[in-house]
Amino acid sequence: MNKPSNIQSASCADAPVLKERGQREVFCGLTGIIWLHRKMQDAFFLVVGSRTCAHLLQSAAGVMIFAEPRFGTAILEEKDLAGMADAHQELDREVARLLSRRPDIKQLFLVGSCPSEVIKLDLQRAAERLTEEHAPHVRVLNYSGSGIETTFTQGEDACLASMVPGLPKTDARELLLVGALPDVVEDQAIGLLSDMGIGPIRVLPAARADGAPGVGDNTVYALLQPFLGDTDAELSKRGAKAIRAPFPFGEEGTTAWLKAIADEFGVDEATFDRVTAAPRARARKAISQAAEALRGKSVFFFPDSQLEIPLARFLTRECGMEAIEVGAPYIHMGLVRPDLELMPAGPTISEGQDVDLQLDRARAARPDLTVCGLGLANPLEAEGLTTKWAIELVFTPVHFYEQAGDLAGLFSRPVRRKEILAV
Ligand code: SF4
């Protein structure tokens, strides 16, 4: 295995970032609709896009065909794209038809796509007009999931950021958890924090529109995902205060994240230890079993999910791996600095992508495990590299103590499989 030359600095937070602006290989922001629509139970996501967008959603969410879906695509036809029809009028008609059929919908997101962006369809104006038309029953918002500028987790960021300006104002001192996690994982986080006496705790996004959290100068918030940079900025604009910490992956990340919140709310050490001791021990044990196959192995991250930096911190510090390159589509330095500070200097930290150059670096390094998108995984496997699909890390519950062993297992399974096949 070739290793990169060591960068002489104390932690990855001091390391220079290799910025690349070439061709990218990632899914677009529409992908987020798959997990967002499950979380927000009275929301509908109407993609204003092409048949390609409709196919992407349909195949990504194949299982939904048995249920009444809460997402769809208003397809822009050639006459719309050529400016021969009034796309706004058609959109109004589609929305009216949808809402009359679905009185359960309280929030409607108009989701922009590559085609709607190319023809400069003003979805913000459409959302304002439609909100007026359908108020107070339905609130219409808009965001872009276009693949021209967004990577797939940015869809969630854009969606949540679009909600923040409309959240009610509150002066209450409340903790706001920000990010769409599976309910069972969210419940674990709320349970741990509540056991420390922290509350009231609110969540963005809420399950239902009438449960939307308030926000104001006394709100403190903790992000659950490192890709929520725009949402973070919108919350700051509303006067809320951020709690910065490593992200809650693995035992160490979860403990650091909880501790930062506990300190903000004045929780004493004894209470913190009492609440976290047992789940910490469980997490450590589960990680150590699952990480056996990972110790001493090298890992290379292609930019995909924006989870790369916290996950590299987890793999290097808790699973005994060595990171060669940690690529992320965008690096929100203010958000991931606490994770970077924990990682010893050495790996190349890269932002953006120039896929051919990065493939050359991966081939030269021959990592034991390559974390990348679906499009790169098969060719790299054919060249003998072991890969992990980054998108699985977003669709699988991986946050907090009880999932820490599963998180290590997601990485160790392909390594084990390779070892078994080699015997
Ligand atoms: S938004 Fe763009 S990248 Fe995404 S499915 Fe539609 S056309 Fe493709």
Image (cartoon, grey):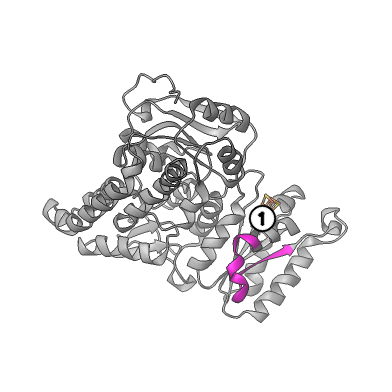
In the rendered view, would you say 79 is above or below 7? Answer: below
- What residue is shown at x 58% (from left), y 56% (from top)? 31
Find numbered disc 1 in the image and state the secondary structure of the residue it sits on: strand
Tell me which amino acid carries mark 1: Gly
Left or right: 120, with 420 as reference point: right
**Position of residue 276 measured from the top left corner of the image (x, y, whole percent):** 20, 56
Q: Is residue 66 magenta?
A: yes
Q: Nearer the viewer, residue 305 or 111?
A: 305
Q: Nearer the viewer, residue 264 or 36?
A: 36
Answer whether residue 170 is visible to the viewer in this image: no
**Position of residue 99 measured from the top left corner of the image (x, y, whole percent):** 65, 76
Outermost left residue: 270
Residue tagged by mark 1? 112
Q: Which residues are magenta?
A: 59-74
**Position of residue 251 measured from the top left corner of the image (x, y, whole percent):** 27, 49
- Ligand 1: does it lie within 8 Å of the C-beta at label 1? no
Q: Quadrant of residue 314?
A: top left
- What residue is shown at x 43% (from left), y 23% (from top)? 3
- Quadrant (top left/top right/bottom left/bottom right) for the C terminus: top left
